[in-house]
Image (cartoon, rainbow, N blue to C red):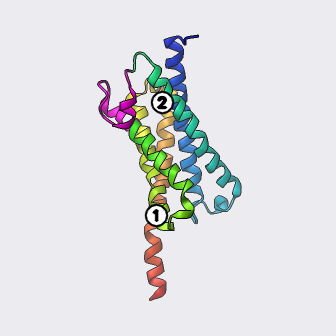
Amino acid sequence: MTLDPQTIWILARATGVASLVALAISMLTGIALRPRLLQPIATNSVVSDVHSYATALWLPFGLAHVVGILLDPYAHVGLFDLIVPFQVSYGALAIGLGTVSVQLVLVVILAAWSRDRLTPSQWMGFHRLSYLAFGAAFLHSILSGTDLAYPWLTGVAWVVAAILAIASWKRMLHAFRQPAVARAQRS
């Protein structure tokens, strides 16, 4: 049984959108887990479970998206393009950003699996790569995705990106203030 190219196209795009949504949920819940950022829910184990589940959910959606793109006769993306970004002949920047995003998320997942062997600062360094991964995935979807021709989907994507940008900014401010507060308390 062979799949119709139109079916492959739809599956590749749908799983791409689904993987971006799962990554966004993972990011939002991960940011929500940080102290003082969203205090009322920061200790909620449900938020932690959703964060873990969304991260795990991203992987099969992302994998299905990549397989769909590899099978799509119009995309012309090969296995080499999954390893070395920005080399594909069509949409090199857009497709390359998708490759970079996948690679960054895989580093974060591998670090999570090895977390007990890492120092807290090493873990946070790897874990913060997820911010870059989401940014690359979002730009990949904006630059290469035909799905964003729908105004409602474009609006949702930009609202989610804005919420994540604001929450990430607040999270970074909190992270940079922590060492300063600790130094001030020791003095």
Q: Amino acid at mark 2?
A: Val
Give above or below for 187 relative to 48.
Answer: below
Write the residue at 47% across / 52% down.
Answer: 166
Q: CA distance from mark 2 to mark 1?
A: 29 Å
Residue 104, compared with residue 185, is above or below; it is above
For numbered disc 1, what is the local secondary structure? helix
Residue 66: which disc? 2
Locate the C terminus and report the quarter of the image it occupies. bottom left
Q: Residue at x 69, y 58 (%)?
A: 44
For label 2, count other residues whose C-alpha is less than 10 Å away and answer few (under 14), some (14-19) or many (20+). Answer: many
Task: Measuring from the top left, give residue 75's x and y in whole percent.
Answer: 39, 21
Q: Nearer the viewer, residue 121 or 93?
A: 121
Q: Nearer the viewer, residue 161 or 140?
A: 140
- Judged from this view, the residue extending furthest toward the bottom is 187
Residue 78 falls inside the magenta stretch = yes
Residue 101, placed above or below residue 187:
above
Name the spot of residue 36 as percent of width and height, x first: 57, 65
Whether the magenta-drawn stretch holds residue 134 is answered as: no
Which residue occupies 48% across, 66% down?
174
SS class, disc 2: helix
Classify mark 1: residues with Cα within 10 Å, few (<14), some (14-19) or many (20+).
few
Which quadrant of the figure contains the N terminus?
Answer: top right
Q: Amino acid at mark 1?
A: Gln
Nearest the eye: 156 or 144: 144
Q: Magenta part of the protein: which range?
A: 76-98
User: x and y percent of residue 113 in the render?
Assistant: 56, 54
| Residue shown at 52% from the left, 35% from the top | 62
Q: What numbered label is drawn on residue 122?
A: 1
